Image: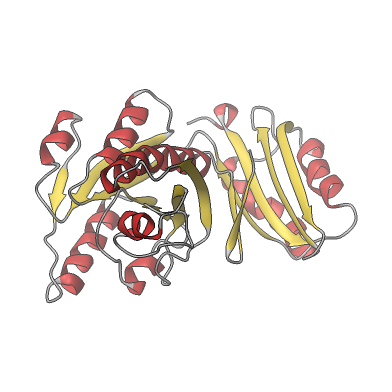
């Protein structure tokens, strides 16, 4: 892809200090870049500066191969953590599923409609149930049955397959297995899970039953990055819906699945558009 058709996206965080927006925008303008979007935030309590800025590379002085090395001295001078990527470069995504199809269907439908700038080379599952759905969308479907005895070996084979296909992001679309810390470490903040609960409430495998038994008036869904700590990774998107004493456990599950689909869709959209910056245990979402 020609650099003239690229849009650079910078995500950056550092200690707050004077002149940061000017320093960054001047670097872009002085090298003939056209800023398309700039969104910055200062956490006054933490004294932390965060920014997302995108610019047109059409007439920019540096190629995409040169850009990071040219910006590095500026980032080092302000003590920044930063990433530069390019909007038009599609992420390669692997979807992990078990038996439930609703989240997978939502992702595949939106991808087919062109909403996500991604490629989906494969779907991985520990069950056969959703092979027909994958076949319908023309995506290779790989089965890795998991037992406590085979888990380590199967994860090794999965990782080899992901490496073979140059996978950037893993989406757990109601994949009912806990990934090992070793697996998670291979994709830092690039494994996205949908949890059928409004975390941190009702963690674990059966939150709707827990919520029903507690008589809660709201149920929710949470999409988050996966870390070694179960269901405690930085949250990307959440939503809730009202329920009442008239709702059965079956009603909670039905309403919850609607939320799971929509929350997943929102989380993936901002992740794929490079609008998420992880800061400690939380995220900054640049809308």
Colour theme:
secondary structure
Tell whether 55 sits left or right of 108.
right
Q: Residue at x 33, y 34 (%)?
A: 106
Name the residue: 46% across, 57% down.
225
**Viewer-proximal residue among 6 and 126:** 126
Q: Is residue 172 above or below residue 261?
A: below
Above-or-below relation of 153 to 24: below
Nearer the observer, 164 or 193: 193
65 or 103: which is nearer to us? 103
Left or right of 100, for residue 243: right
Q: Where is residue 6 in the image (x, y as percent from the top left)?
A: 57, 32
Spot occupied by residue 197 in the image (x, y as percentages of width and height):
41, 54
Q: Is 116 left or right of 62, judged from the image as shown?
A: left
Identify the residue at the far right of this view. Answer: 18
In the figure, is residue 68 to the left or right of 103? Answer: right
Q: How many marks?
A: 0
Residue beneath the point at 41% across and 62% down: 202
- Residue that appears at 30% across and 57% down: 209
**Residue 132 percent location from the top left of the image:** 11, 36
């Amino acid at each position: 892809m020609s650099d003239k058709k690229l849009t650079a996206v910078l995500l950056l965080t550092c200690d707050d200090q004077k002149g940061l927006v000017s320093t960054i925008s001047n670097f872009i303008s002085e090298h003939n870049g056209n800023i398309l979007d700039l969104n910055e935030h200062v956490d006054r309590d933490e004294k932390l500066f965060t920014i997302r800025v995108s610019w047109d590379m059409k007439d920019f002085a540096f190629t995409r191969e040169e850009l990071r090395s040219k910006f590095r001295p500026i980032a080092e001078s302000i003590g920044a953590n930063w990433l530069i990527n390019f909007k038009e470069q599609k992420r390669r995504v692997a979807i992990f599923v078990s038996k439930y199809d609703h989240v997978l269907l939502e992702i595949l439908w939106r991808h087919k409609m062109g909403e996500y700038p991604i490629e989906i080379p494969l779907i991985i599952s520990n069950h056969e149930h959703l092979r027909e759905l994958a076949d319908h969308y023309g995506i290779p479907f790989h089965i890795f049955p998991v037992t406590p005895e085979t888990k380590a070996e199967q994860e090794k084979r999965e990782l080899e397959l992901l490496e073979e296909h140059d996978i950037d992001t893993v989406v757990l679309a109601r994949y009912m297995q806990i990934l090992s810390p070793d697996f998670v470490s291979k994709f830092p903040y690039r494994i996205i899970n949908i949890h059928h609960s409004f975390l941190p409430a009702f963690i674990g495998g059966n939150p709707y039953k827990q919520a029903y038994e507690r008589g809660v008036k709201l149920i929710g869904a949470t999409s988050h990055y996966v870390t070694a700590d179960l269901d405690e990774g930085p949250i990307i998107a959440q939503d809730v819906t009202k329920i009442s004493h008239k709702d059965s456990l079956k009603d909670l599950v039905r309403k919850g699945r609607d939320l799971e689909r929509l929350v997943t869709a929102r989380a993936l959209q901002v992740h794929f558009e490079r609008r998420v910056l992880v800061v400690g245990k939380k995220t900054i979402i640049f809308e």
